[in-house]
Image (cartoon, rainbow, N blue to C red):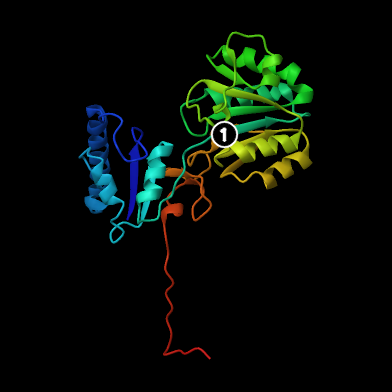
């Protein structure tokens, strides 16, 4: 049995930061009823899908210890929920969905083509885990390219948190100095971090330090740099000349998505039904023995 735990109003000690809205419970009840109706229509037991309709958070703590009955927990929510499940579960937990996502614009990137990719990655749906959080730009093109980025994205309501080098190149009311934690922040909104880096090595070092291993990419015309980026960046999805918004089960041909796993084993990246199935070996002999 797989259980998906979902909530965003969660503290690290499991306490509630606010009452669950009645609308959420009612919506979930309707959705579960639709799924059960579909199960019945094809002759499957409706109890395949269950919903805990009591908002008491203590029940989650109890559920995390039902390892005799539940095979895996997939928490859907913020970092505090994930940490709570990791610390308190006696059941395997597949964590993911938290994304501090990067794009690095290399020195020889096609800047005209890069702008729509960055725009899409940041603005198409800014509140999701695969939206762009930090843009890294090679110093040789930063003075030319960063003003274009700000001009293009600010029209969509984006504001910017820029490191010192990037801020020195930008005179715009929507650009503010980056704070000490900004490059570790999953914005989930129309905010974008900007940083100037001297080379690919520095971009890789920044990603290694600040990435949550969700979705990171490079925009480049240099095939060697692209291959090095792919080899060096240990994220669930790594992109070359594409928007990070493609980290999605439907987009990658996996069908319905349960989660985006940022861990290494067993499932990683967008998770469809194959990633949630297990198997067993069946050996049939004729009173066979091993020599």
Residue 96 lies, with reference to residue 16, above or below; the image says below
Residue sitting nearer the eye, 2 or 13: 13
Residue ID for mark 1: 101
Please give the name of the residue rendered at 56% of the width and 29% of the height, measured from the top-left corner: 132
Residue 260 horizontal side relative to residue 200, left or right: left
Residue 277 horizontal side relative to residue 214, left or right: left
Count residues near mark 1 (Cα–Cα under 10 Å), then give few for <14, some for 14-19, many for 20+: many
Residue 176 horizontal side relative to residue 21, left or right: right
Q: How many marks?
A: 1
Q: Quadrant of residue 159?
A: top right
Please give the name of the residue rendered at 79% of the width and 24% of the height, measured from the top-left corner: 140
Instruction: Specify whether residue 106 is in view.
Output: yes
Q: Position of residue 131 (x, y in %)?
A: 53, 30
Badge 1 element:
strand
Instruction: Specify whether residue 51 is in view.
Output: no
Residue 161 lies, with reference to residue 232, above or below; the image says above
Residue furthest to the left in view is 54
Q: Quadrant of residue 194?
A: top right
Q: Quadrant of residue 243?
A: top right
Q: Position of residue 109 (x, y in %)?
A: 75, 28
Q: Which quadrant would the N terminus be assigned to in this image?
A: bottom left
Q: Position of residue 173 (x, y in %)?
A: 59, 8
Q: Position of residue 206 (x, y in %)?
A: 65, 35
Please give the name of the residue rendered at 25% of the width and 29% of the height, measured from the top-left corner: 19
Residue 285 lies, with reference to residue 65, above or below; the image says below
Residue 262 horizontal side relative to residue 39, left or right: right
């Amino acid at each position: 049995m797989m259980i998906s735990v979902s909530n965003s109003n969660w503290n690290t000690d499991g306490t509630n930061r606010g009452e669950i809205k009645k609308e959420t419970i009612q919506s979930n009840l309707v959705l579960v009823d639709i799924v059960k109706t579909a199960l019945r229509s094809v002759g499957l037991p409706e109890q395949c899908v269950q919903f805990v309709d009591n908002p008491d958070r203590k029940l989650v703590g109890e559920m995390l210890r039902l390892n005799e009955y539940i095979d895996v927990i997939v928490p859907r929510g913020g970092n505090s929920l994930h940490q709570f499940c990791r610390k308190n579960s006696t059941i395997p937990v597949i964590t993911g969905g938290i994304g501090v996502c990067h794009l690095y614009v290399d020195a020889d990137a096609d800047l005209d083509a890069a702008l729509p990719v960055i725009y899409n990655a940041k603005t198409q749906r800014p509140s999701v885990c695969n939206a762009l959080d930090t843009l890294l730009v090679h110093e040789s093109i930063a003075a030319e390219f960063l003003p274009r980025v700000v001009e293009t994205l600010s029209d969509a309501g984006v504001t910017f948190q820029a490191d010192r080098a990037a801020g020195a190149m930008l005179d715009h009311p929507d650009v503010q100095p980056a704070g000490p934690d900004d490059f570790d922040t999953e914005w989930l909104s129309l905010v974008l971090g900007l940083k100037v880096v001297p080379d690919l090595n520095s971009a890789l070092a920044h990603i290694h330090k600040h990435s949550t291993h969700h979705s990171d990419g490079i925009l480049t015309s240099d095939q060697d740099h692209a291959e090095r980026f792919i080899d060096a960046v240990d994220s669930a999805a790594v992109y070359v000349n594409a928007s990070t918004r493609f980290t999605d089960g439907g987009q990658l041909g996996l069908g319905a998505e349960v989660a985006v796993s940022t861990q290494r084993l067993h499932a990683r990246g967008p998770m469809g039904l194959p990633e949630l199935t297990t198997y067993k070996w069946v050996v049939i002999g004729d009173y066979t023995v091993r020599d």
